[in-house]
Amino acid sequence: MKVPNKVKLANLPTPVEQLNFRNRKFFIKRDDYTGTDFSGNKIRKLEYLLYEAKRKKADIIFTCGGEQSNHCRATVSAAARLGIKTKLFLWGKDSNSAEGNLFLSKMYGAEISFLNKRNYENVNEIMFEEKENLDKKNKRVYVIPEGGSTTLAIWGYISFIHELKKQVDKRKVNGMLLAAGTGGTAAGILVGASLFKLPLKIFTINVLYNKGEITNKILQLTEGIISEYKLKCRIKESDLEIMDGYSKEGYKNFNGDKIALVSDLAKETGILLDPAYTGKAFTAYYDHFIKKNKTNKVMFLHSGGIYGAFAKRKKYLNYL
Ligand SMILES: Cc1ncc(COP(=O)(O)O)c(C=O)c1O
């Protein structure tokens, strides 16, 4: 098996911890600890993408997402570390008092183009058109799609399983619950679990796409990487369960009950979750596993995103 090269950026391995919440114990994999500026799941993907960008001698990186995108913030800071500039194409509005991830993206020196929701639907065309213009001026642009979810990037979550296998007892863990945005994290974990023979059912919470769309995205990525890298493994669709209905308020919003739960978790365990991804995923974990006292074999993945909470701090403060 030929594993692609990567540039080392993340603090790995991230710990597995046991928490106690409302008198129930559960395991959590702390991918919020991958770094400070690079915190969260995105950096595992960026290690592979930015190696490729460096190899191709990119002058600038283009990528896209919401104005509070964790992926965009992690890209800008990691690229800055490697001496590469980034241009972000963000769905949202500029603000003089930019908060959370947008504040950080600005601090790390991103050039930013803001798009409304309608224009953002064509963000790939917009990025490629601008790339073509720069190509003509002999500027090398490396384009990273939304969420960094490519077949190259998801090697980050294949190697995550290699790391996890050394940390857990196979007899004690048989599932993992996580949030899915573009689906790359879930796809990498599915392939990694099959490749490294760690039987793991993946429960994922779709925060951005509907159930059918996210299922297709995840399975297309798994099929893509298996055929591109000729991996000797097979994905069973039954190893993936989408827990739908936890983002009814919309990707950029976070509703009251969920904030109250996240607030209680913070008080009892000292762990903060974000509004777009992990807060929604933890609500599902609470309903399906903690409440039913079924946590013993299914771990929760903290995939980071904490800076998104700062942008919603007024809402969070209402639930103290
Ligand atoms: C904090 C956090 N968790 C989970 C995800 C979902 O990752 P993916 O896009 O690979 O599904 C993202 C990114 O979109 C994220 O920022």
Image (cartoon, rainbow, N blue to C red):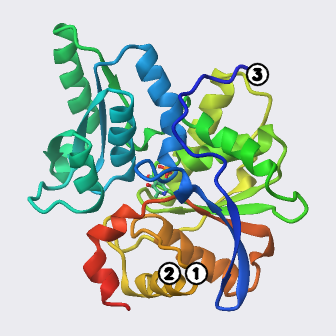
Of the numbered discs in the image, which one, if any, rests on residue 241? none
- Horizontal side of 78 relative to 48 (left or right) equals left
Nearer to me, 276 or 201: 276
- Is 4 or 79 nearer to us in this picture? 79
Kindly check if marks 2 and 3 are in contact, taking CB atoms under 8 A apart as contact. no
Quadrant where the N terminus is found in the figure: top right
Q: Is residue 39 above or below residue 222?
A: below
Q: Determine the CA span between mark 3 and mark 1.
A: 40 Å
| In this rendering, position of residue 22 left or right of residue 83 | right
Q: Quadrant of residue 59?
A: top left
Q: Is label 2 within 8 A of ligand 1 (CB to nearest ligand atom)?
A: no
Give the residue at mark 1.
Answer: 269
Q: Position of residue 177 (x, y in %)?
A: 64, 64
Distance from Cα at disc 2 to Cα at disc 3: 42 Å
Q: Residue furthest right?
A: 171
* Pointer 1 local density, CA inside 10 Å: few below 14, some 14–19, many at least 20: few
Say what secondary structure mark 3 lies in: loop
Q: Which residue is mark 2?
A: 266
Q: Is residue 259 left or right of residue 201?
A: left
At x 49%, y 24%, the residue is 51
- Which residue is identified by label 3? 1
Q: Is residue 45 above or below residue 167?
A: above
Which label sits in the foreground, 3 or 1? 1
Q: Please state the horizontal and vertical placement of residue 86, each as a whole percent of the image.
A: 27, 33
Inter-mark Cα distance, 1 to 2: 5 Å
Please tell me which residue lies in front, 111 or 233: 111
> To which quarter of the image does residue 228 belong?
top right
